[in-house]
Amino acid sequence: MLAEYIWQRCMKQQVTTGDFSALLTGLLLALNLPATLPLWMCVLGGVFAIIIVKQLFGGLGQNFMNPALGARCFLMLSFSSAMTNSIPKGNAVWGGYQATLDAASSATPLMQVKEAAGGADVAASLKDMFLGTTWGTIGETSVLALLIGGIYLIVKKIIDWKIPVIYIGTFVVFNFIYVCVAKDAYMPVFYEVCGGGLMLGAFFMATDYVTSPITDKGKIIYAVLLGLLTGLFRFFGESAEGVSFAIIIGNLFVPLIEMVTIPKAFGKEGKKS
């Protein structure tokens, strides 16, 4: 919020921090970061999200991609080691408080699934991943909490159910097809759904009003595209994750999707008598 305030004052624009859109961006960015990330990197990510992704393109309603996801990808490319170190080894001191941790630093459960060969065990159980008693970025660990929040938004009609449901459903179908075609593949669908940022991205990031389609057909096409891209990135890419890049690429296609799915106005292109 401070970055937005300073930028708008320097550019002699109307200060819009009162709409709290910058606060929402900060919250979503925080949920995409590991708890051990140095605070100065969090600040850098927040400044990048607000100034580079949002304000340089005209401010609220004009950004071409989700600011929080843009900042996450920026931090992932710039500080990959810090962004993937979810749990510190041994005891850690956070803000002057001593915290004793049972888990040691290791790959996230999703990465362990990707690296597993021949049905090898994954350290985290499906129950741990569903409840959130495992490691990962702050907003990707508890599927239960994400489902409660997502269902609440759908019931209140804040978001449309089409994007998250079709997104997750397309990814599940892609997962089944991949496992059937690649017989040696070990990609258990429930681990893939509960691991990583799929649930967070589907309910809270892909449904962003500014960067998602407004037409019903467009939402379906957009959601299917996200599911396919996430599957391609996860199963054929080097990283076990792919939600952030899938949503950003999907954001870039939104203007084209809306152009081909927006209904024609009544009476348009009619013949003159």
Image (cartoon, rainbow, N blue to C red):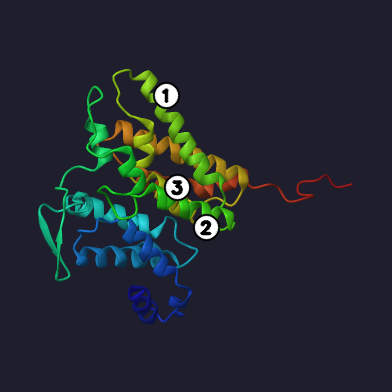
The numbered mark, 2 or 3, whose residue comes first in the sequence reads 3
Q: Position of residue 80 (x, y in %)?
A: 20, 50
- In the rendered view, does 97 fall on the left or right side of 200? left
Crowding around mark 3 (Cα neighbors within 10 Å: few <14, some 14 to 19, many 20+) is: many
The alpha-carbon separation of the residues under discs 2 and 1 comes to 31 Å
Q: Position of residue 97 (x, y in %)?
A: 15, 68
Q: Quadrant of residue 79?
A: bottom left
Residue at which label 3 appears: 202
The alpha-carbon separation of the residues under discs 3 and 1 comes to 21 Å
Q: Position of residue 3 (x, y in %)?
A: 33, 73
Q: Nearer the viewer, mark 2 or mark 1?
A: 1
Q: Nearer the viewer, residue 16 or 109?
A: 109
Residue at which label 1 appears: 177
Placement of 182 over or under 97, stated as above or below: above
Q: Name which residue type carries label 2.
A: Tyr
Q: Residue at x 40, y 69 (%)?
A: 22
Q: Name which residue type carries label 3.
A: Ala
The numbered mark, 3 or 1, whose residue comes first in the sequence reads 1
Residue at which label 2 appears: 209
The residue sitting at the left extreme is 90
Task: Label 3: state its secondary structure.
Answer: helix
